């Protein structure tokens, strides 16, 4: 794959690319898939290929019936404003977690995702597949997090998920600003510590064994964004 | 692998099996791993193997330094009582989702997990790895869901996650009883529909594009269990 291109595969994601036109896509599909999807393909150019040819291009274990090869658009730097919700990703390297977080961010209407330069690229094929199409609507901006956060209006709260933080449910935090998520294996990067205004942790349930040490970062993102959404709906 | 055995791999999970003694385990490790883990291995029998031999047994892409081969214990049928929280899994076939749900159930102190017979086995190696050890403490009981739910005390609420349900945050549901989760691609199995007392859905955020159609089932489990835990702590 050329450096400025990425691949999206399968009959769930490709139709979303067709209808959005995202990334000036080039489509390749089997004759059978094309024949049964005439309606969404009106006015769209698509190359016909044998299943074997798609197998060669595909990154999946089972080759899809259709793929899209898209251009990676230029990165847009988000403008940080009060009253919005930004997700800040610190060293998230697992593609499945990154994709799930992008899908969640679209579901909950996060305003922007900002990622450290050592996070996995959103254009990684495994990320693309696990977003289920949400990358069309929201993608991380990769940048030096420290410089980025320091450039913020000091009135914007910088919250972080951390096992040592305040109880997510009983804390009086305001559900806006930046929410920093780190990979569970490495914890919060030291260089971010001094920038944080408040740390939050997800409490265990009453009957928990207390032996599961942490949650997966995408799962933690889900719980945090759920609670932010609940509070935002009430305010 | 023999039918009544399963494999757990790597230096995160195996020490938890060592300290719990779960599944009458048999351990195999490299000389190097054994030498640097003398403390946790006191009184424990472990077979020495070359890395190459571990590679042959391993199910991971990178062979671990240590593995445990364990017996699958006999299944215990949970007793259903009022005031408890049971997670009911309907056709969850993805091993990563199943493992993540087991990890969440341990974190939040779910009382039992009951799974339909077409769910992936908890002893599947990919499930084991993604539980991060939580399977030692909580495992699904596989059964005919319909018969199981019908045998319940009618006072126990049967809740289900469903895109057509009441808003999770504004609904007045009581956070106990059974919570049914289905795979996002198939939705709730028809045979369960008539047994449900209340359906809940996870609302999108205010600024959501509205175009992400659903959430991954493990992500949905995280959000629902988070909200159940918040309400249970308050009551």
Image (cartoon, coloured by chain):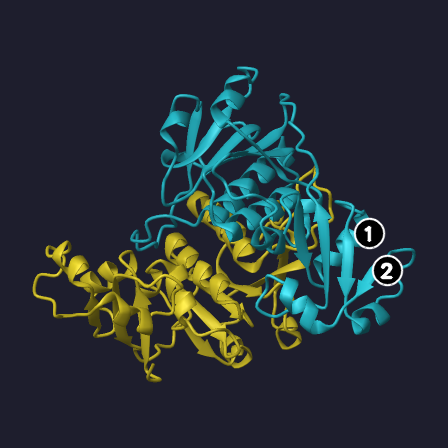
Chain colours: A yellow, B cyan
Residue A200 percent coordinates (x, y)? 62, 56
Say if A4 sits above or below A227 in the image. below
Please give the name of the residue rendered at 14% of the width and 54% of the height, measured from the top-left corner. A36
Residue B176 percent coordinates (x, y)? 57, 28
Contact between marks 1 and 2 (CB within 8 A): the answer is yes
Residue A64 percent coordinates (x, y)? 30, 62
- Return the residue at label 1: B19
- Return the residue at label 2: B40
Say if B62 sits above or below A205 in the image. below
**Toward the viewer: B196 or A106?**
B196
Disc 1 residue crowd, few under 14, some 14–19, many 20+, Cα 10 Å: few
Q: Quadrant of residue A215?
A: bottom right
Left or right, B89 with respect to B137, comes to: left
Q: CA distance from mark 1 to mark 2?
A: 8 Å
Q: Chain of mark 1?
A: B
Q: Quadrant of residue B175?
A: top right
Q: Residue furthest left?
A: A43
Q: Residue furthest bottom?
A: A3
Disc 2 residue crowd, few under 14, some 14–19, many 20+, Cα 10 Å: few
Please give the name of the residue rendered at 63% of the width and 66% of the height, measured from the top-left corner. B56
Say if B129 sits above or below B113 in the image. below
Residue B32 percent coordinates (x, y)? 80, 74
Say if B91 sits above or below A103 in the image. above
Left or right, B111 with respect to A58, comes to: right
The secondary structure type at the circle numbered 1 is helix
Q: Residue furthest right?
A: B43
> Which mark, by number, is residue A124?
none
The secondary structure type at the circle numbered 2 is loop
Q: Residue furthest front?
A: B2
Between discs 1 and 2, the one toward the N terminus? 1
Please give the name of the residue rendered at 8% of the width and 61% of the height, measured from the top-left corner. A42
Residues beneath discs 1 and 2 located on the same chain: yes
């Amino acid at each position: 794959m050329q450096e400025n291109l990425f691949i999206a595969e399968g009959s769930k994601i490709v139709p979303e690319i067709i209808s959005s036109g995202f990334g000036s896509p080039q489509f390749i599909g089997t004759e059978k898939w094309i024949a049964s999807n005439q309606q969404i393909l009106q006015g769209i150019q698509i190359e016909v290929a044998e299943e074997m040819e798609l197998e060669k291009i595909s990154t999946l274990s089972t080759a899809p019936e259709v793929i899209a090869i898209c251009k990676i658009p230029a990165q847009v730097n988000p403008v940080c404003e009060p009253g919005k919700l930004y997700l800040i990703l610190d060293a998230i390297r697992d593609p499945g977690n990154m994709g799930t977080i992008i899908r969640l961010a679209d579901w909950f209407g996060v305003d922007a995702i900002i990622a450290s330069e050592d996070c996995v690229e959103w254009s990684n094929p495994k990320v693309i597949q696990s977003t289920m199409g949400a990358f069309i609507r929201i993608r991380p901006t990769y940048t030096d997090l420290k410089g980025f956060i320091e450039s913020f209006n000091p009135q914007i709260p910088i919250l972080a998920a951390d096992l040592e933080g305040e109880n997510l449910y009983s804390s009086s935090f305001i559900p806006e600003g930046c929410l920093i998520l780190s990979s569970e294996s490495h914890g919060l990067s030291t260089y971010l510590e001094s920038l944080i205004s408040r740390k939050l942790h997800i409490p265990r349930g009453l009957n928990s064994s207390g032996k599961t040490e942490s949650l997966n970062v995408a799962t933690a993102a889900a719980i945090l964004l759920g609670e932010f959404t609940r509070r935002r709906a009430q305010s």
